[in-house]
C-alpha cells in the first residue's frame, strides 16, 4: 500500500488532540478533588531558603544549664560538645568573636557532614580559635547534601569577604561511602590522604551522630583514620547500657535494624573501647562522656512541639513522629546511652 502523507498527518493530529483532551480531563478531576480553600498555599508564603539544614539529635542545654528550645541551636551545641571535649575549643566565656593567637594547623575528615551547617561551624571555629591553616574533607552518601553544602560554603565565603581567612580550596566535599574506604574512588582517596600531611599539627576524624549507621561496622574507617592518617577521633555515638536487660538490649538492636543500622551496631562501652584499641587508638587516651540526660528528652519535647505546630497547617511529621517515639523509649528505658567519645592515636602520645 502506498504511504498516504495526508492520512498520516490527520491521524497524528487526532492522536495528539486526544492525548491533550485526556490530560485536561485528568487535570480537571485532580483540581476538583483538591480543596482550593485548604492550607496547601503555605508553600507560596515561604520568603527564603531555610537559614539552616542541621540534622542530628542535638544537645538540649545551654552552657548555663538552661534548656534549648530551637533545633538548629541544639544541633550546633552537640557539635560544640564534641570539639570542646577534643580540646579544639577553648574553655572560656569569651563571646567577643576575637581571633585567638595561632595554634598550628587543623585538618578534619568529617563523616556524614549533612548540608553544610557543621562544615561552616568548624571553619569559623578554626578561624576564631587561631588555627593558621584549615583543611576539611567531608564524605556523605547523599549527593543532594553534597550539592547543598557546596552552595552553602560558597555563599558563606562570599558573604564573609575579608572577615575570614578561609577560601573554597580549604574544602573538599564528596559523595562516598565513608564506612568502606576500599570503595573510595581515586579523587576521594587522594583528598583523604592529603590530610596525613605532617604540616597539619592536629588531624581529626569527626563523626557527628552517624557511626551507628555504618555497615558492616565502624572498624574500616576507624582503622584507616588511625593507621593511614594518624588522625585522632572525636564523635557523638550511641552505646548500650551494660546494665540493661537482655530483652531490652534485643529490642534496641531491632530498633536499630529498623533505623537501617547493622543488627549489632550498638556496643557496650567496654566493647567500644576495645574496638578503638584494635583500630589503633591508645587505650589510656580514650574518654567517654555521657550526655544522655541532655539529648533524648530534649529532642522528644522538640519533636512533639513541632508536630503540634505543623499539624495546624495540615503538614505531617511522617517518619520523624515515629523517630520521636523511639527516642522517647531510649530516654525512658536508658537501654541506649548518648555519649561523646574522644580517642588519640598511640603515636600522638609521648
Image: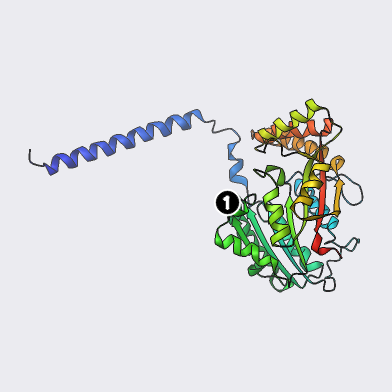
Read off the residue under disc 1.
Answer: 144
Outermost residue to the left: 1
Quadrant hosting residue 284? bottom right
Secondary element under disc 1, as helix, strand or loop, is: helix
Toward the viewer: 70 or 56? 56
Residue at the top extreme of this rendering: 247
Please report the residue visible at 79 percent of the width from the left and 55 percent of the height from the top: 281
Taking the image as shown, residue 62 lies to the left or right of residue 224, namely right
Count of residue discs: 1
Position of 157 with respect to 269 (left or right) is left
Q: Quadrant of residue 193?
A: bottom right
Say which residue appears at 84% left-offset and 69% top-offset: 98
Residue 314, above or below 83: above
How far from the left and from the top, in percent, is residue 251?
Answer: 74, 28
- Given residues 184 and 147, the one toward you in this image is 184
| Position in image of residue 191 (x %, y %) | 62, 64
Picture quadrant where residue 348 is located:
bottom right
How did the renderer colour the structure?
Answer: rainbow
Task: Judge whether 197 appears above or below 345 on screen.
Answer: below
Residue ID at (83%, 27%)? 245
Amino acid at each position: 500500500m502506498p504511504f498516504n502523507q495526508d492520512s498520516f498527518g490527520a491521524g497524528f493530529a487526532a492522536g495528539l488532540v486526544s492525548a491533550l483532551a485526556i490530560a485536561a480531563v485528568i487535570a480537571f478531576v485532580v483540581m476538583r478533588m483538591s480543596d482550593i480553600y485548604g492550607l496547601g498555599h503555605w508553600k507560596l508564603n515561604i520568603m527564603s531558603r531555610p537559614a539552616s539544614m542541621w540534622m542530628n539529635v542535638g544537645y538540649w542545654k545551654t552552657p548555663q544549664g538552661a534548656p534549648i528550645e530551637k533545633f538548629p541551636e541544639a544541633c550546633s551545641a552537640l557539635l560544640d560538645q564534641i570539639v570542646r571535649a577534643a580540646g579544639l575549643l577553648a574553655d572560656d566565656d569569651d563571646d567577643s568573636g576575637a581571633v585567638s593567637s595561632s595554634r598550628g594547623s587543623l585538618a578534619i575528615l568529617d563523616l556524614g557532614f549533612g548540608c553544610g551547617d557543621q562544615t561552616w561551624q568548624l571553619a569559623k571555629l578554626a578561624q576564631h580559635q587561631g588555627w593558621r591553616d584549615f583543611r576539611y574533607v567531608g564524605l556523605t552518601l547523599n549527593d543532594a547534601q553534597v550539592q547543598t553544602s557546596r552552595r552553602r560554603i560558597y555563599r558563606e565565603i562570599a558573604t564573609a569577604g575579608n572577615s575570614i581567612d578561609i577560601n573554597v580550596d580549604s574544602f573538599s566535599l564528596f559523595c562516598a561511602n565513608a564506612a568502606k574506604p576500599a570503595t573510595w574512588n581515586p579523587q576521594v582517596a587522594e583528598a583523604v590522604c592529603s590530610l596525613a600531611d605532617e604540616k597539619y599539627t592536629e588531624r581529626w576524624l569527626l563523626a557527628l551522630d552517624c557511626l551507628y549507621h555504618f555497615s558492616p561496622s565502624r572498624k574500616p574507617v576507624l582503622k584507616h583514620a588511625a593507621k593511614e592518617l594518624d588522625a585522632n577521633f572525636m564523635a557523638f555515638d550511641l552505646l548500650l547500657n551494660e546494665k540493661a536487660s537482655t530483652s531490652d538490649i534485643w529490642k534496641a538492636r531491632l530498633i536499630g535494624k529498623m533505623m537501617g543500622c547493622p543488627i549489632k551496631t550498638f556496643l557496650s562501652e567496654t566493647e567500644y573501647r576495645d574496638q578503638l584499641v584494635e583500630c589503633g587508638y591508645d587505650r589510656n587516651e580514650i574518654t567517654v562522656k555521657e550526655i544522655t540526660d541532655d539529648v533524648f528528652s530534649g529532642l522528644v519535647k522538640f519533636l512533639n512541639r513541632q508536630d503540634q505546630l505543623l499539624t495546624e497547617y495540615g503538614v505531617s511529621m511522617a517518619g520523624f513522629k515515629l523517630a520521636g517515639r523511639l527516642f522517647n523509649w531510649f530516654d525512658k528505658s536508658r537501654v541506649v546511652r548518648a555519649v561523646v567519645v574522644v580517642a588519640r592515636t598511640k603515636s600522638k602520645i609521648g
